[in-house]
Amino acid sequence: MCILTFIKPGIVADYDALAAGAAANPHGHGWAVHAGDRLVVGHGLDPKITITEFAQARMLFPDGPALFHSRFATHGKQTTANCHPFAIGGDKRSVLAHNGILPEHVHPLPGDDRSDTRIAAEDFLPRLPFGSLDSWTGRTRFERWLDTDKAVILTVDPAFKHPAYIFNEQRGHWRDGCWYSNHTYDLGRFPHGVVYDYSSDDGYCENCLIELEDTDGPHCLNCGFCAQCQRPYPRCTCACPDDERYPDLLADIEFETA
């Protein structure tokens, strides 16, 4: 099935919903954040790590659109290479994420380990089979080709008129500034803290049990757990002067940039 989430500019993602969607669609995860002149992207097989990386990137670049995808594999191996989003035609200025099963002509042939969406992004869509996606005709043709599937494109390519596109938007739903391609995040939804096993030892993080290092804040430098409000990263609810809730974690973060 997969689940695809689009987050509007300025909106904080519902990280519980992302984690629940990842639990229901466990075969790999990925994200992209529009950072003005570039896309910041990430992929991973561990949902906790991938969601944490996305939250960190979103905190640094909150003013652009973003997407998050969790995969339920139908074609292709379960590897990070098959985690959405995919660069369109190898051009990292534009990425595609998709929910559904695409038409058979983009399914992998024997010996091809790629997913159908990856094949579409790398081989099919770069040929502009529908014309410009900014035109009414091109958009309509693409959405008809998708049928009941949904897709999101983020781009910094000036050839596009807009930084973000949702295709077959009406087949998903909006909630609190986020668009979801389906309701599978309800299948894996959990309350705060249930998926974490806390313990208590002086000098050790209560979440990951790593020995604590000297820090200027209440957050574990390994996992981000907040010793003050007892919440895992990124759910700290402590007062945050200057609108920066995790200044002790963000000093030297480096991300893959497209």
Image (cartoon, rainbow, N blue to C red):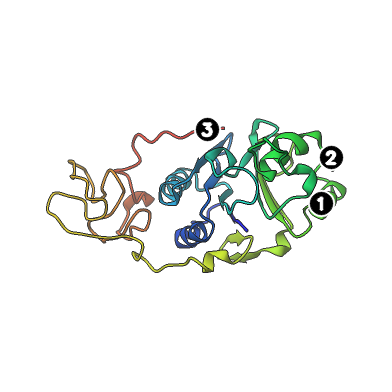
Q: Helix or strand or loop: what does disc 2 sit on?
A: loop
Q: Is residue 27 toward the left or the right of residue 151 in the image? A: left
The structure residue drawn at horizontal position 26% and vertical position 48%, both measured from the top left corner, is 220
Assess whether mark 2 and mark 1 are in contact (beta carbons under 8 angstroms).
Answer: yes
Q: Position of residue 249 (x, y in %)?
A: 32, 43
Which label belongs to residue 257?
Answer: 3
Q: Within 10 Å of the Cα at label 2, are there few (<14), some (14-19), or many (20+) other Cα atoms?
A: few
The structure residue drawn at horizontal position 59% and vertical position 41%, both measured from the top left corner, is 82
In the orientation shown, which residue stands out farthest toward the front? 110
* Cα distance in 3D space between marks 1 and 3: 30 Å
Image quadrant where one finds the N terminus: bottom right
Query: Of label 1 and label 2, which has the lower sequence position?
Result: 2
The residue that label 1 is drawn on is 145
Q: Position of residue 151 (x, y in %)?
A: 69, 51
* Cα distance in 3D space between marks 3 and 2: 28 Å
Q: Is residue 101 toward the left or the right of residue 247 in the image? A: right
